[in-house]
């Protein structure tokens, strides 16, 4: 399996046709067809169903797409790094974060970094927490900003922060008249929450066990949750970064009488290849992120060593450790 096979597969998945893929790759249509056939022969399964000029991915095609895109991204990173080394350029800083953290902390932190060190090449993308960790572990990203849990033997956690979650509701909602929302009030309303069962939703279920589950609305993005609230579909309990970064006149936030904590931290790869210029930028960005996080309402900083204890405490298994500086 060669890079050209993966590029042909990616182009067909993107364009939806062999003709469109040939145009994207600036190759002939028969050449792209041959590459797809060679890839299918090597894998042993058809990747597309043909419908005249258009194609539909098979189950195997859909299953392969994410891995192919990840592999191509890594190859592009290697190629770019090689060109930078040859030109003796400042290396690109590649950052990956969950959407809420990318929105709520990274822009100001990156601006602070560049005010100190000057502009440099930068790549920023947002994705799921699991993909953030995978990108850092694979070397596709230099720094990750992600919600807990972050335990992996290949990761270095630079710092951990916590902030209290808030309720997001329409300004014309009767509950908006209350300065603090009770768990009982939330239990009587349709709740909008994030659908990852091992992160914020798990802590939400522990803190608010009495709410109704039958009409629960789940989404993978805090921005989506706010849009659903705006449409009048329910009340959301979210980390505070998204409401702070995307304020809306028709939405309000309220603190909760029951503590639901959102934990997050900065991660890098433990055994990173040494590049002094890049290392300096990574460390400076980690500190700039911490300075921005300290401005969040209710922010508490914890040492990386408290990771497991923090999660146990959030689930009511042990007392919460005191805040610690780094």
Image (cartoon, rainbow, N blue to C red):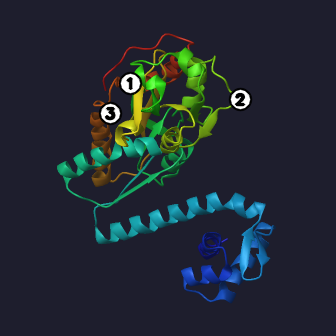
Label 3: how many Cα within 10 Å (few below 14, some 14–19, many 20+): many
Label whose residue precedes the other's in the sequence (1 or 2):
2
* Pointer 2 residue: 214
Residue 48 versus residue 27 in the image, above or below: above
Disc 1 to disc 3: CB gap under 8 Å: no
**203 and 124: which is toward the camera:** 203
Q: Is residue 201 left or right of residue 52?
A: left
**281 and 236: which is toward the camera:** 236
User: Within the image, what quadrant is residue 57 found in?
Assistant: bottom right
Residue 197 versus residue 8 in the image, above or below: above
* Front position among marks 1 and 3: 3
- Counting from the top left corner in percent of width and height, residue 150 is at 51, 34
Q: Quadrant of the N terminus?
A: bottom right
Q: Is residue 133 left or right of residue 45?
A: left
State the separation of the CA atoms marked 3 and 2.
Answer: 35 Å
* Pointer 1 residue: 303
Q: Secondary structure at mark 2?
A: loop
Label 2: how many Cα within 10 Å (few below 14, some 14–19, many 20+): few
* Pointer 3 residue: 293
């Amino acid at each position: 399996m060669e890079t050209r096979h993966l590029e042909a597969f990616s182009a067909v998945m993107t364009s939806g046709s062999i003709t469109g893929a040939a145009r994207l790759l600036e190759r002939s249509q028969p050449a792209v067809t041959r590459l797809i056939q060679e890839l299918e022969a090597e894998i042993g399964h058809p990747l597309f169903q043909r419908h005249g000029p258009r194609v539909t991915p098979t189950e195997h095609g859909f299953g392969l797409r994410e891995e192919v895109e990840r592999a191509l991204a890594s190859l592009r990173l290697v190629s770019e790094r090689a060109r930078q080394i040859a030109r003796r350029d400042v290396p690109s800083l590649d950052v990956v974060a969950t959407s809420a953290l990318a929105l709520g902390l990274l822009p100001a932190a990156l601006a602070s970094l560049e005010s100190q060190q000057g502009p440099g090449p930068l790549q920023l993308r947002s994705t799921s927490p699991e993909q953030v960790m995978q990108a850092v572990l694979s070397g596709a990203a230099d720094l990750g900003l992600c919600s807990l849990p972050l335990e992996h033997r290949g990761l270095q956690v630079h710092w951990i922060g916590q902030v209290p979650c808030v309720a997001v509701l329409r300004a014309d909602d009767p509950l908006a008249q209350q300065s603090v929302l009770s768990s009982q009030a939330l239990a009587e309303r349709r709740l909008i929450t994030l659908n990852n069962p091992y992160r914020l939703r798990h802590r939400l279920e522990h803190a608010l066990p009495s709410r109704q589950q039958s009409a629960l609305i789940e989404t993978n993005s805090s921005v989506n949750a706010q849009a659903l609230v705006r449409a009048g579909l329910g009340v959301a309990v979210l980390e505070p970064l998204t409401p702070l970064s995307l304020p809306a006149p028709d939405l309000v936030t309220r603190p909760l009488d029951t503590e639901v904590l959102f934990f997050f931290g900065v991660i890098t790869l433990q055994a990173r290849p040494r590049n002094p210029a890049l290392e300096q930028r990574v460390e400076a960005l980690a500190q700039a992120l911490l300075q921005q996080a300290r401005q969040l309402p209710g922010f508490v900083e914890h040492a990386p060593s408290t990771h497991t204890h923090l999660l146990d405490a959030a689930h009511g298994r042990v007392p919460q450790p005191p805040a610690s500086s780094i």
